[in-house]
C-alpha cells in the first residue's frame, strides 16, 4: 500500500518526463506501441519510465520486455479517470463503468497492445504469463 501512496504523491506534478527519458523510452517501442505511448499523460509516462528504469537495474532484458514495462499501464487510458478518481476506484472498487475499466486495465492494455502489433514476448509479459521477467516487472512496479 505504501507504494500506492508514493505513486499518488508523484502524480501531483503534471510535469512531462525529461526529454532524454522520453527518447530512451521511445527507443524500445514499435510504431504501433509508440502510438499507444502517446496516449499516456505525463504522470503515467513518468511512472512507466520509472518502472522500466527499475526493471533495467534488475537484469538484462530484451526490447520486447522493456516495451512491456513501458506499456504495463496503457489500459488505464481507456477509463480516462483523474488522479482522484483513480484513488477512489482503487479504494472503493468497481462501482461505475469507468471504474471497472480502470480496475480491468491489465486485460484492456493487453488487447490494446495486441491490436498495436506488439510481439508475442511483450504480450506474454502483459498477460502475466509466469516468467522471471514478469516477476521482475511486478517488483519494479512497486514504487
Image (cartoon, rainbow, N blue to C red):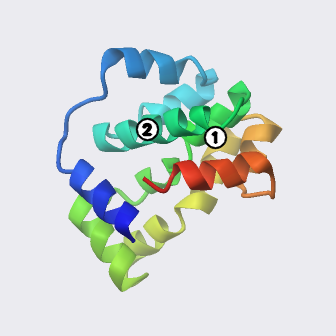
The residue under label 2 is 50
Q: Among all residues in the image, which is located at the extreme front?
A: 58
Proximity of marks 2 and 1: CB atoms separated by less than 8 Å: no
Q: Is residue 33 above or below residue 105?
A: above
- Few, some or many residues within 10 Å of mark 1 (<14, 14–19, 20+): many
Tell me the quarter of the picture where residue 92 sits: bottom left
Image coordinates for residue 93, horizontal then vertical, percent: 41, 83
Looking at the rendering, in which quadrant would you find the N terminus?
Answer: bottom left
Tell us which disc is closer to us: 2 or 1.
Answer: 2
Query: Real-space Cα distance between discs 2 and 1?
Result: 13 Å
Image coordinates for residue 37, horizontal then vertical, percent: 48, 33
Q: Residue drawn at (71%, 29%), measured in percent from left and top? A: 60
Q: Is residue 62 left or right of residue 80?
A: right
Image coordinates for residue 114, horizontal then vertical, percent: 70, 43
Image coordinates for residue 117, horizontal then vertical, percent: 71, 33
Q: Is residue 46 above or below residue 29?
A: below
Q: Is residue 48 left or right of residue 9?
A: right
Q: Residue drawn at (30%, 43%), measured in percent from left and top? A: 43
- Name the secondary structure under disc 1: helix
Q: Residue drawn at (31%, 28%), measured in percent from left and top? A: 17
Looking at the image, which is closer to me, 101 or 42?
A: 42
Amino acid at each position: 500500500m505504501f507504494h500506492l501512496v508514493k505513486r499518488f504523491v508523484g502524480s501531483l506534478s503534471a510535469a512531462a518526463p525529461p526529454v532524454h527519458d522520453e527518447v530512451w523510452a521511445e527507443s524500445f517501442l514499435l510504431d504501433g506501441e509508440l502510438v499507444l505511448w502517446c496516449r499516456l499523460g505525463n504522470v503515467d509516462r513518468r511512472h512507466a519510465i520509472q518502472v522500466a528504469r527499475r526493471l533495467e537495474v534488475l537484469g538484462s532484458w530484451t526490447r520486447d520486455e522493456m516495451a512491456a514495462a513501458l506499456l504495463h499501464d496503457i489500459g488505464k487510458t481507456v477509463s480516462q479517470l483523474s488522479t482522484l478518481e483513480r484513488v477512489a476506484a482503487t479504494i472503493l472498487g468497481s462501482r461505475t463503468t469507468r471504474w471497472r475499466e480502470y480496475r480491468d486495465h491489465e486485460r484492456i492494455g493487453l488487447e490494446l497492445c495486441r491490436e498495436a502489433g506488439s510481439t508475442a514476448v511483450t504480450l506474454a509479459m502483459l498477460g502475466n504469463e509466469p516468467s522471471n521477467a514478469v516477476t521482475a516487472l511486478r517488483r519494479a512496479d512497486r514504487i
